[in-house]
Image (cartoon, rainbow, N blue to C red):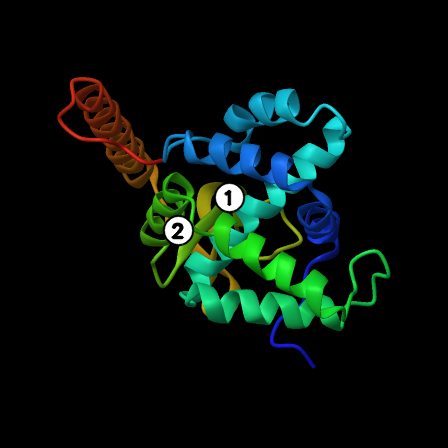
Amino acid sequence: MPALEIPKKYERGFVLIRSFTDTDFEQILKILGAATPASEPSDILPSLRTHLPDFPADDVQKFLDTIYSLYMYRSHADAPIDEFVADLSEAIRHSANKDLQTADPAELALLGSRLKSLLGVRPLSILSKAHGLRTDFANIFSDAKVISDIRPIWDGAVTNPPEGVVITQTLKLEYSSIDGSEELYLYLDKDDIALLISVLTRAQEKIATLESLSGTGWMKILD
């Protein structure tokens, strides 16, 4: 079995990489190379569509998504380009997708050469390194919810109405860890909620200040 498998949603992107003419491919490299490290796919897409008029817009989008996914995956795996490209070529050789699969040495050589060129685009390489550093944590936040409960209090027979109730708040945190998806439940009182709001508001203010400094040339922020 190959060292990795290409997700179905990116298979079309690999087919396109192999099908581009040399002229198309050179133009693609120029466009990607002219991007900034903070560029999102949506920033690059219009230029690619303009210079690839013979390809449906959906295909251009799939190609671009494939390229970004390769950078993100390689950043996470921290694999050398040659090794990564060899694994991708092996995955294509064993693919069940007839449009993608090939064992032809010339086609695999062309694809390998183009993948190396695409993975050597400096702005995207910087972006992938920034992404790797930004997510290099043991636990990564996924979602949050506050669950409110009313808990009745009895002081005697439970066949009688309760003496009163208490209202509780539980903070449910969902996060990803090395073991997969995890959940954490924490009791909160009014003071805890006020403290969380204060801490998060302060975090937003810090971000706004740092983002404003990036506009003055103090530093460059890579989202």
In the image, farthest residue toward the bottom: 1
User: Local crowd at mark 1 within 10 Å, few (<14), some, or many (≥20)?
Assistant: few
Residue 91 disc label: none
Say whether residue 110 is left or right of residue 171.
right
Q: Quadrant of residue 57?
A: top right
- Nearer to the camera, 220 or 185: 220
Mark earlier in primary sequence (2, 1): 1
Q: Residue at x 31, y 31 (%)?
A: 197
Q: Which residue is mark 2?
A: 187
Location of the C terminus by quadrant is top left
Query: Residue 188 in the image: x percent, y percent?
Result: 37, 45
Q: In percent of the image, x 25 and y 33: which residue is there?
A: 203
Q: Position of residue 17 (x, y in %)?
A: 66, 47
Instruction: Please say if 187 is above or below 76.
Output: above
* CB under 8 Å between discs 2 and 1: no
Q: Whole-Å distance between the Cαs marked 2 and 1?
A: 23 Å
Closest to the camera, between mark 2 and mark 1, is 2
Relative placement, left or right, of 117 versus 90 is left
Q: Is residue 81 toward the left or the right of residue 59 in the image?
A: left
Residue at the location (23% across, 31% down)?
Answer: 220
Residue at the outermost left position: 218
- The residue type indicated by label 1 comes to Glu
Q: Position of residue 166 (x, y in %)?
A: 46, 43
As rendered, which of 182 and 209 lies closer to the eye? Answer: 209
Q: In the image, what residue type sits under mark 2?
A: Tyr
Q: Which residue is mark 1?
A: 163
Q: Residue drawn 67% across and 64% down? A: 108
